[in-house]
Image: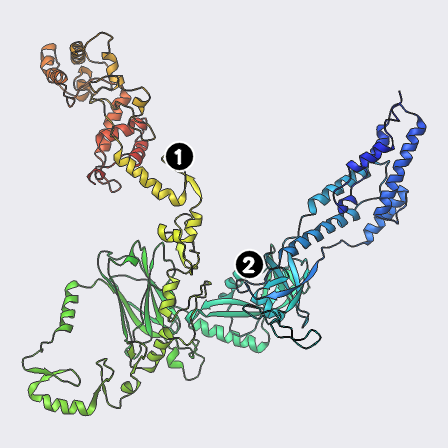
Amino acid sequence: MDAGPALGRREVHEQEEEVRPESEAAASLAPPRHVAVPYDISVGGSFSKRVGLVRYVRLTVAAWVALLDKNHTLTSASASSKTSTVMAESPQPTLTWSAQFSVSSTRSEGLPGDKILLPPSALEALLSASSNLAAETARSELPAYDPYNSATYSAYRKAESQYQDQRQQLPYPLTFRLVNPQNGRVVYAGIREFSAEEGEAVLSPFLQQTLGLEVQHGTREEPMVVDEDDDGPTNGVHAPTITVHIKQLPKGTFVKLRPLEAGYDPEDWKALLEQHLRQNYTTLTNGEVLAIPGGRGIGGKKKEFRFLVDGFKPETDGICIVDTDLEVDIEALNEEQARETLKQIAEKMTRAPGTDQGSSAGGELDIFKVQQGQVIPGEYVDYQLSAWDKGQTLELELSGEEDTDDMDLLVSPLSATQRAKPRLDEHKFADFDGRPRKRIRLQPTNVELENAEALYVSVYAFAPVNVQTNGNADGQENESRPRQFTLRARHPNPDEETDSAAAQNTEAPPNEGDVRCKNCGQWVPQRTLMLHENFCLRNNVLCPKGCGQVFQKRSPAFEQHWHCPHDTAYGDSSPSHQKHDALYHPPDVLRCSECATQETFASIPALAQHRTTTCPAKLFLCRFCHLVVPQEGDPDGPNAEAMLSGMTPHELADGARTTECHLCNKIVRLRDMETHLKNHDLDRYSRPPPIPCRNVNCGRTLDVCSKNGDTRAGTRMGQGSGNDIGLCSVCYGPLYVSMYDPEGKALRRRIERRYLQQLVTGCGKGWCRDEFCKTGRKTLGLEGSVGTKEALPMIKPFLEGLTKGDGATPLHFCVDEKSQKQRTLAVMLAAEDGPMVKGGYGLEWCIGALEAANGELDGARQWLKNWAPARADKKR
């Protein structure tokens, strides 16, 4: 036999074509699998043919290795040594890619921190560069190929597998180096999405400011060419361009920040800085300025804490802050700033809440106790009213000093739909009147108080824009001093309200003969009216605007008295006028700082109405995830399904999760569970009641109740009672005979004999409590034995009821201990009437519940709750 000729050059070429890789990058890694052919030729054939075949294979391997590295020799030893030398000297290859894009102004406002948007073609280019890098990495680690060494073949196979695993992998997180070619500024950024238009990149406002870009917001116009040969500027708007490089940054372990202004307290910005960096930043660049948003001011304007990034560890010009423990060091710019910061922190400590110079700490508000406190202008004092009579009118009253009218009373309910404390731009009820006494009256029918757990009550002292709340401004000590106030909550007397209203509307003089002065409106005796009017007209003046106030002529109060030209508001001081204009007629257009609505607001109360109703950032308690989260949604295009269902957009999305109904085991969406359970309630009200056994000692029903609430389960399965006298199948069993008895005479004789046997002989069971059984009478303590003569009159009424077909006539037969216990428990369960169940349940439902729960009391209560209508439900 000669097996050599069967494996010639043509077949070798065919094997080469079959194992050829799909891509060029993979072709550089895949070993020529036909090199294993010489090892397979082990029998038959001439030696010369085998040697020639081996020589051909060697030439193929040599050519393949030469393509891989022309400097390698065919000697395996020299090739291996040279490969190891190259691997030791060559650095590890890194992913490289760069491109130029024009900066787009669209969608930039919604990008936070250092995030950018790139086009989808950039992702394709990055994946291609990653594939080439994976091939280069795998190729650099390969030894010289030796056809006589199976280990090298395994190494090439392993390298090819590694390449296939890494060719579509990108480093995480993806970080980029952005360069502005106009001014040479450099900043590092993280990717948000690959969803920009082709040839464009969208940068966040922070990156645009750091790179010094001036992007024209709005729609770009096509440039109008004046003369193609003219090198002058063309008309139109040209977007700036940037160069984007892929750059893998090291994980940062330390960063030094320097505040740009004095007075930053670590307690103010520590939590804000940590949250802001975690949510908005992937990288940090040395020399950039971080703006950390702080609390909100009037009109939604936010305060900012600004820090200069000044140094990292490791010492580079940029670091990655994702999945790393970053130590932050805050250092002042200079000694003067450090001293000023310490001074302002010390002053702030003296004016901290609860101190003599600071605002009160707030706390619980009692309906029977008056709260005394003070508040610094620009700050809030928060109280919580947890208990009040929700069936009566509630009045909240704030009294201040006589010469101060800049304190306001804000109220918001604490409920599932309202979770935020009342603030100037986020409240439900408020009194901004210019008088020292503020009052808010809440009726029990107010829909905002529905399902309210408590009431948040806040006292706010208005601070003009030019007033420094820290007290450092000269000449403003009076404006920044604490305002004293008295706050109380009470239920007003209805008779008191009626008397005060009648006193205001009456025109009757308080004394007989009194008349009203036409100038000041006071009641004076008619005999002195002339003298009073002469004095009054000479010294007093009535407000010509119609507010009814009377002032002394040339008095400061009259000079500062004002009326708003836009509405009916008025006041008696310049600060009250300034406060009214700031709240109701602000100089700038108000926008919500928490959402992207296009709606503008004319006043602070209008903004507060938006913040507590349609704002997507409004916090509420989700009924499905039971977390306090924003309600989400589009404020300019309300969701019709959310409005009809009474849910928020967040609840619509969260309620799409499914769960199993605990009653019917069906899979139901969470948001549909309430409607699904109402259908169960309708079934519960219309479900036929169980029919208990006619035997008063038996705890079973005629049709057998099931655990899923079916009161006719046994009958549907063919396990009914099988008789028409109202006994269950167990009680009727001893009375059954197969004889023909259409009139029931024989059945009545059997029942009579059983009664006589029980009364005369007894059943002999120690647990029996049947009063028509000798054993049961002894257990119950009934004295006197019953003979046949005495027994016949006792059982005669029951036999007559059977003859007449009266189903209400009870029967008394001895039963097993379990059935007797179930009947006793059913009687006790039917007598229960607690706050959870108004009126309790009927006896027939209690017997069916214990039968379905197999005598377990807790299971029977749960069965009744799920499937049985209460006595109060039957009256509906």
Res 308 visible: no
Residue at image x 94%, y 29%?
Answer: 48
Task: Judge left or right: residue 187 versus residue 346.
Answer: right
Residue 617: % across, % down: 43, 59
Residue under circle 1?
665
Which residue carries the number 2 mark? 278
Left or right: 531 with respect to 130?
left
Image quadrant where residue 775 sits: top left
* Residue 244 visible within the image: yes
Q: Amino acid at mark 1?
A: Asn
Question: What's the amino acid at mark 2?
Answer: Arg
Reading the chain from its start, which is encountered first: label 1 or label 2? 2
In terms of depth relative to the viewer, which is nearer, 244 or 575? 244
Disc 2 on helix, strand or loop?
Answer: helix
* Image coordinates for residue 307, horizontal then vertical, percent: 57, 69
Cα distance between the residues tagged 1 and 2 = 42 Å
Horizontal and vertical percent for residue 438?
28, 71
Is 228 drawn above or below residue 106 in the view shown?
below
In the rendered structure, the answer to whether residue 748 lies left or right of residue 151 reads left
| Residue displayed at 76% across by 39% down | 157
Residue 651, percent from left and from top: 41, 50
